[in-house]
Amino acid sequence: MTTSRAAGGGGTTRCLIADDQAMVREGFAAVLAAQPGLLVVGQAADGADAVQQAQHLRPDIVLMDVRMPVMDGLQATRQILATASPGRPRVLMLTTFDLDEYVYEALRAGASGFLLKDATAAELVHAVRVVAAGDALLAPSVTRRLITDFARQPHSGPPPPPLGALTPRETEVLRLIAHGLSNTEISDTLVIAEQTTKTHVGRILAKLGLRDRAQAVVLAYETGLVIPGEVAETHHYRQE
């Protein structure tokens, strides 16, 4: 049975949990297994095991711990997402610390977001559903600090694509995405319909060849559209 990753789509979301702590794996598995539409198909104790299981079990979502023995979550994410296959899973990084140098690199590698391991059961389920629906999970409480700190690090990879293809409004939407705003918050800020915001986001991703909002955030910082440490000037648009 294939999973519909479109928002509101049906189907079962197949989940693989990778964490070197058995209690964490089992706890997450119990929470997810109790939810309708979510199926835990496997558990991995290290990154190498996660890569192997992802190849055989074909999960829709991999919950990936950052620090694991044998192979860390960053390298495992790179290997899992190395294929260009449309059926490849989405990766949700799990981290103990809200400022983890590996998480920013994981976003570069294509991870769809991250979640603190002390998140509540409701937050965990929400995260899995958001990522399964094709969105990125970038919790504002973590994203703004993490991206600000690690976007300053020099980037040794290929240069990011230019933003010239974007309209002025799309550029503004990208800037707000990079500040960690949700579609609802962006809509309120720009005083536009939420469906219009979703359309802008879709066009931004398509024009720039990005998988999701996580990569859009990284790109916004790498191109200098957003400067580390600056605050979104949402008051310029809000109707108070």
Image: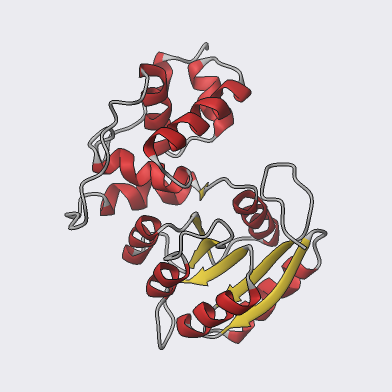
Residue at 69% over, 42% down: 7
In the image shown, does 116 or 54 lie closer to the viewer? 54
Q: How many numbered markers are drawn? A: 0
In the image shown, does 150 or 2 lie closer to the viewer? 2
Drawn side of residue 209 relative to residue 225, left or right: right
- Quadrant where the N terminus sits is bottom right
Whether residue 94 is visible: yes
Q: Is residue 144 above or below residue 71?
A: above
Give residue 168's quadrant in the image.
Answer: top left
Place of residue 92 in the rendered image (x, y in percent of width and height, measured from the top left) = 53, 61
Drawn side of residue 115 relative to residue 102, left or right: right
Q: Is residue 130 above or below residue 71?
A: above
Drawn side of residue 153 relative to residue 24, left or right: left
Colour basis:
secondary structure
Residue at 44% over, 51% down: 142
Place of residue 136 in the rendered image (x, y in percent of width and height, measured from the top left) = 52, 48
Place of residue 170 in the rendered image (x, y in percent of width and height, measured from the top left) = 41, 24
In the image shown, does 5 or 74 lie closer to the viewer? 5
Q: Is residue 58 above or below residue 43?
A: above
Identity of the residue furthest to the top in this view: 239
Drawn side of residue 126 relative to residue 217, left or right: right
Whether residue 179 is visible: no
Identity of the residue furthest to the front in this view: 85
Residue at 42% over, 66% down: 82
Q: Is residue 78 above or below residue 50?
A: above
Place of residue 44 in the rendered image (x, y in percent of width and height, measured from the top left) = 57, 82
Residue at 58% over, 80% down: 53
